[in-house]
Amino acid sequence: MEALDTFRKLIALLYREIGMLKSRNHQELAGKRKLEFDFFPDRRKTLSGDLYRRTRQHAEPGSILRTFEEHTGLSLHDIERAFREGDWKNSSGNYSYGGPK
């Protein structure tokens, strides 16, 4: 049970961070975002916490992932691609999100 909750927390954190995704970071994947839930970027912290709590009763990792995917439009693979391939440099030339770290 503890391992599943750790997984749930990590997924919530990843989705919280990808909530900063904009077209300038990765145009293709930004186009997949579901904007009707107001997750990107305004409510990303609140909604990722809400989704974490909503998935507490889920006993399967796939069910947890589906809940986050349904609300954001992004799969775990999409998130990995966005952070790896995207342009995440800020105006000072440093990385705030994503990038090579």
Image (cartoon, grey):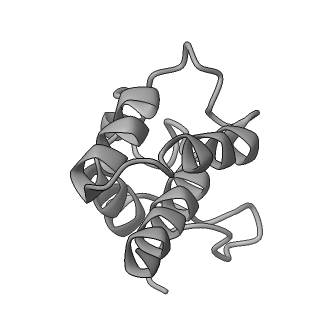
- Residue at x 42% of width, y 41% of height: 68
- Whole-percent x, y for residue 36 in the image: 55, 13
> Could you say where residue 72 lies in the image, as x and y percent from the top left?
45, 32
Q: Position of residue 52 (x, y in %)?
A: 57, 50
Residue 41 seen from this side: yes
Q: In the depicted view, which residue is nearer to us: 35 or 95? A: 35
Q: Residue at x 51, y 52 (%)?
A: 56
Tell me the residue at 49%/86% (across/down).
Answer: 101
- Measured as percent of width and height from the top left, residue 58 is found at 37, 48
Number of labels in the image equals: 0
Q: Is residue 46 above or below residue 80?
A: above
Q: Quadrant of residue 66?
A: top left
Say which residue appears at 22% left-offset and 51% top-offset: 62
34, 54: nearer the viewer: 54
Up-down: is 12 above or below 19?
below
Q: Residue furthest top?
A: 36
The quarter in which the N terminus is drawn is bottom left
Q: Is residue 9 left or right of residue 42?
A: left
Q: Residue furthest bottom?
A: 101
